Amino acid sequence: MSTTPLTIYRPGLAVGRDAQVLHRAASPEFSGWLEHTRPAGGCARPIRLTGTIAAVDRNTGRITGKLHTDARPDRALYKACGNRRESVCPDCAWVYRGDACQVVCRGLTGGKGVPASVGRHPVVFATFTAPSFGPVHHRHVPRHTCRNRQRCDCRPAPCRARSNAGTCPHGRPAACFARHDADDPRLGRPLCLDCYDHDHQVVWNYFSGELWRRTKQAADRRLAALCRKRGIPFVQVVSASGKVRWVPPVRVAHGKVAEMQRRAAVHFHVLLRLDGVDPDDPDALVPPPAGITVDDLEDAIHAAARQITVTTPAHPDQPEGWLIAWGEQVDVRRINTAGGELTDGKVAAYLAKYATKATEATGHSSARLTPATVDDYADPEGDHVARLIDACWHLGRPTHTDMSSGAATVDDRQDSLDAKSNIYGGLRRWAHMLGFGGHFLTKARRYSVTFRLLRDTRATYRREEDDEPADTITVGTLTYIGAGWLTEGDALLANTAARQRRESRRIGREELAHEAWLLGAAA
Ligand SMILES: [Zn+2]
Ligand SMILES: [Zn+2]
Ligand SMILES: [Zn+2]
Ligand SMILES: [Zn+2]
């Protein structure tokens, strides 16, 4: 008769995940542990903290209770990592995506302190693209018949059909007759890696935020000029310090996400909303004057995108600098127009999706690169991504050129380009992002609610759920002790519990909605 050897679990002893799960679940403090880890339950890699947490009466400032994390399970406090990237932490990204949706939606329809009247402001959804840095394999479907673009299986046109294109200087074919599937790994890859201008692309990514900033400014200036021409008076506003200024009667508030395409160039998807100015309350959100319409907003965006280019400061490899301009014409669409396919819900979901991604579409994903790790990824003779990373590292090298004398720009505002040091140095810092150093979701201050407000609301909600008195705030004096769950088994248990909680909440919501619908139908 064979006997199974008894496994005794001791911390540090290598045991399988199943044994870890059994050990945790069998411990007398299991339910306490589950409750204790709940705030970070779904997180892939929570932060563990140690220290004291004090409950403070909001009114009197008196400490009403004190607890050291040593007295809690695992002698630590678990905090969700909060990473917005789906590939890093699906659960925290899920929360972030919800918040991003809220931020975008509130700016379109109002709510959570944003007046509902914003729903009547002219608004457009624009896509700003990067130019070409050399031909890449691409998939173009002339006419979609699919239901879901995410799983599009429509017949695409041939990639780059040119019958007498011949070959490039490196002897490679300059045409491609393949009809690429949506998941073809060749998509976004150059036809010839040696012809492709990797340097220009990473510099473009690096300066794309500046190009956007100036384009937005130019659109604002165009609208201001239009107001002048049409005799719509400027508005006098008095700042808190008593300074009097005359400002244009319209301004554009925006929310924008960056999308890293497969070829690793950045796109911007931007919501642009036209607001007015209330002279008595310059921070209020009011409709724009009737004399400025959505047509004017559209025209201003197109014209600004055509007009604005940035010439980057001199670089030893490119003494005249690089030209940074938008690609093909900007795609501008109206939202919520009769018969249109763009609704604000769709736009919000679309933007929120990109807000939880970074370089994933390019096939590259790594932490910030250092001199010790860069060689694992950069290669001037390597594949597309390896060459882009190499370009970042190479162009970002320390140089001895005085960059401040080399700054040549078309715009009169040079503040952020007047480099006193080597402005290209940042390319190394952002090599893992293929040059792009901006945030993936940004918005004008006035556009909508803030992420912070949403987080605070959630914390308050959680407190109420836990029946903690509303006039108590908790203050922690905590230090970091590590990241991640103690064992794979712990991760499995906590993540599963979190998933079940969410699932039951979702079902609860659906049942409520269904009931409400039945009631409505009966009435
Ligand atoms: Zn997380
Ligand atoms: Zn192709
Ligand atoms: Zn399709
Ligand atoms: Zn070539």
Image: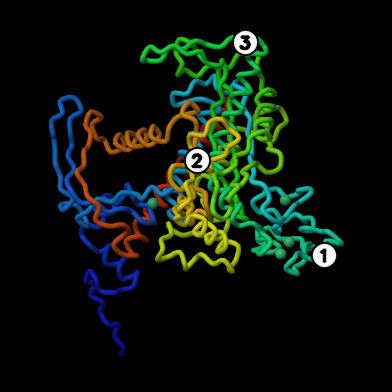
Which residue does the image show at 57% across and 18% down from the upper left? 250
What secondary structure is marked by label 3?
loop
Q: Which mark is residue 360?
A: none
Residue flagged by tag 3: what amino acid is it?
Answer: Ile
Q: Are marks 3 and 1 in contact (CB under 8 Å)?
A: no
When the figure is inspected, residue 71 is found, relative to residue 220, above or below; the finding is below
Q: Is mark 2 within 8 Å of ligand 1?
A: no
* Number of the label disc, if any, that sits on residue 166: 1
- Tag 2's secondary structure? strand
Instruction: Classify mark 2: residues with Cα within 10 Å, few (<14), some (14-19) or many (20+).
Output: some
Estimate the spatial distance between the alpha carbons at disc 1 and disc 2, rounded to whole Å: 42 Å
Q: Amino acid at mark 1?
A: Gly
Report whether the residue tagged 3 is closer than 8 Å to ligand 3: no
Residue 441 disc label: 2
Residue located 62% across and 10% down the image: 232
Q: Which residue is mark 3?
A: 232
Closer to viewer: mark 3 or mark 2: 3
Figure quadrant of the N terminus: bottom left
Q: Nearer the viewer, residue 370 or 257?
A: 370
| Foreground tag (1 vs 2) | 1
How far, Cα to Cα, is label 3 from label 2? 33 Å
Expressed as whole percent of the image width and height from the top left, the position of residue 71 reads: 15, 52
- For the residue marked with disc 2, what is the amino acid? Leu
